[in-house]
Amino acid sequence: MTIIIAILQAILLVVVAPLISGIARKIRAKMHSRKGTSILQDYYDLAKLMKRSEVREGGSGIISRLMPPIFLGCFVLIAAGLPLVMQACPIPMLGDMITILYLMALPRFMFALASIDSAGSYTAIGGIRELLVGVLVEPSLILVLFVMASAVGSTNVGLMSTAVANLQATPLVAVVVAGVACAMACYIEMGKLPFDMAEAEQEIQEGPLAAYSGPSLAMLKLGVSLKQVVVASLLVCIFLPFGSAPTLAPLDILIGFLVFVAKVLVVFLIASVIENSAMRARYKILGRYTWFVVGIASLSLVFLIIGI
Amino acid sequence: MDMIGYPLVNALGACLIITSMTVVLAKTMRASAFLYSFQSLMLVAILASLGFVTSSSELFTWSATAFVTKVVLVPAILLFTLKKIGGDAHADLLPKINSMKAVALVAVEVFVCFVAVSGIELPTAAEVKPTLAVALAHFFIGLTCIVIQRSIFKQIFGYCLMENGSHVALALLAPQAPELVEIGVATDAIFAVIILSVLVWRMGHYAHTLDADDLCELKG
C-alpha cells in the first residue's frame, strides 16, 4: 500500500514541477509589471523539446549522455521516499537522511562532471559555480539534519516528521533554530536568486545546459524544476509536517495531500517573493550569505548540546 | 509548575541569544535600539518566570524595575541620542569582520560557556544551567560587539548586552537577593548608558564621525 503512495507521490511531483516553476515565473513577471507567459509555458517547452531530435557535441563522452537521466532519476527517487502525505516514509529505505543527502549530491557531481566533459569552455565555469554552491550549502544542510537526527534519535526522515508533528522533538529551541537554518539552506539549494541557474540570461551561468538539446534538455529542465519541488518538500516534511496523515485511512491521506499541496505552494510563494527582491550575485561573494546559514546551523547544534 | 517552568526559562534564554545576535547584526542603529528593547523584554520574561519557578517575590520587583529601565528608558535614551547626533550617526560603518561570520562566532562562544558552567552547582536548580551558559555567553557577545563594530554608538550596545548577561546571571545565582543589592547590577545600567550616550554625542559633535578607528587619531 505504502509503495503505491510512494510511486503516486513521485509521479505527482514530476507532473506538478513544471506547473510550479511556471507559477514562479508568472509571479516574477507580475512583480516586474509584465504580463508574463502562461503558467503552462514549461509544459509547452518540454513538449517541444521532446519532439526535437538530439544534437550531441563532438568530443563529449558517455558522462554527458548519462547525466540527464541520472539527474532526473535521483530526484524522482528522493520524491518517492519522502514522507510527503503521510507522517511516516512510504519507503523507509529511501527515507534515510544519509541516502537523501547522497541522492542530492550525486546529481550535482554528475552535473559538474558533465560540464568538464563538454567541449564548450563556458560550461565548465557554470559547473564550478554549481559545485561552489554545493560546497557552501551542503555542510549547513548536513548539520541541520544531524541536529534533527540527534533530537529525534533516528536518521529516518519519517520518524523526524512524526516526532515534529507530535511535538515530541526535544530540545524545542534547537529544533526551531534548525528549522530556520534548514529553510535558508533549502532556499539556496532550490537554486533561486542569487544562487540560481539562470534560464537564458547569461551563458556562463547556464552552464552545462548550454551543451544539451532535445529530450536531454527536456529531462534536465524537468529535473531542475523537480529539484526545487523536492527540496521544498524536504523542508516541509521535516519541519512543517503538521496536517500529514498519521494513519493510512483514506480521509487522512486526502487531508494530508491537500495540506501538503497548500504548504508547498506557500513555500514557493515566499521563495518567489524573496527571489524577486534579490539581485544576482557574483559567485565569489556567495560565501557571505552562506556563512550566515552555517552560523545559524551551528547555533542550533550548540542549542542541542546545551539542551534548550 | 516545574514541568513547564524550567524549560520555559531555558527557551527564553535561547531567545535572549537570538535577539542579542539580531542587535549585533542589525543594519541601522535605530533598529538595534528597538531590538535591544525587545531583548530586554525577554530578560523581563526570564526574571518573571524565574520568580514563578523559585517563588521568589524579589524577582518580580526585579522584573518590574528591569522593565522600566531596560525596556523603556535605555532604548529611549539611545534613540534620543541618535536623534541628537543626526546625520553623522547614519554614516555607513561596516563591522570589522563579516557580520555573518559573527553568528558562527556567537555559536562557538555559547558552546564554550556551556562547557565552562558545566562544573558549577547552582543554588536554584540544575535545570537552568543552559540559561547560566547563556548569561555568561552574553559577556562574550557584548565583547564581540564592542570589538567588531566600528561605530562607537554600536559599541554601547555591546555594553548593554553584557549588562543584561550579568542581570540574568545574578537572578540565577541569587534569586532571593533583595532589590537594594540588585541596584548595583541592574539599575546602574541606565546611568552608564547616559554617560556613554553623552560621550558619544560629544565625540560625534566635535569629530563629525562615529568611527572608532578615526577617533583613535584624535590623540593629544
Image: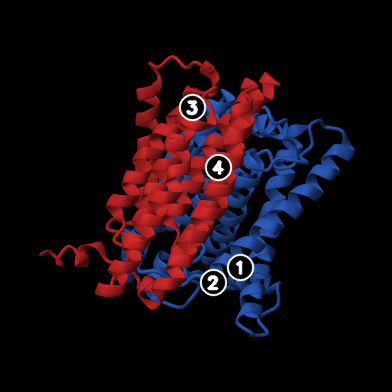
Of badges 4 and 3, nearer the viewer stands: 4
| Pointer 2 local density, CA inside 10 Å: few below 14, some 14–19, many at least 20 | few
State the residue at coordinates (57%, 53%): B72
The amino acid type of the residue labelled 3 equals Pro
- CA–CA distance in space, label 2 to label 3: 38 Å
Quarter of the N terminus of chain B within the rendering: top right
Task: Using the image as rendered, state which of residue B207 and residue A290 is in the foreground.
Answer: B207
- CA–CA distance in space, label 2 to label 4: 39 Å
- The image position of residue B27, as x and y in percent, is 43, 63
- CA–CA distance in space, label 2 to label 1: 6 Å
Reading the image, the residue beneath label 4 is: B66
- The image position of residue A203, as x and y in percent, is 39, 75
Q: Chain of mark 3?
A: B
- CA–CA distance in space, label 1 to label 3: 37 Å
Badge 1 and badge 3 both on one subunit: no
Badge 4 and badge 3 both on one subunit: yes
Q: Is residue A93 depicted above or below A127 in this figure?
A: above
Disc marking residue B130: 3
The amino acid type of the residue labelled 2 equals Ser
Residue A135 falls left or right of residue A18:
left
- The image position of residue A99, as x and y in percent, is 51, 35
Circles 2, 1 touching at the beta carbon (< 8 Å): yes
The amino acid type of the residue labelled 1 equals Val
Of badges 2 and 3, nearer the viewer stands: 3
Reading the image, the residue beneath label 1 is: A273
Question: What color scheme is it?
Answer: by chain
Colour of the chain lettered A: blue
The amino acid type of the residue labelled 4 equals Ala
Badge 2 and badge 3 both on one subunit: no
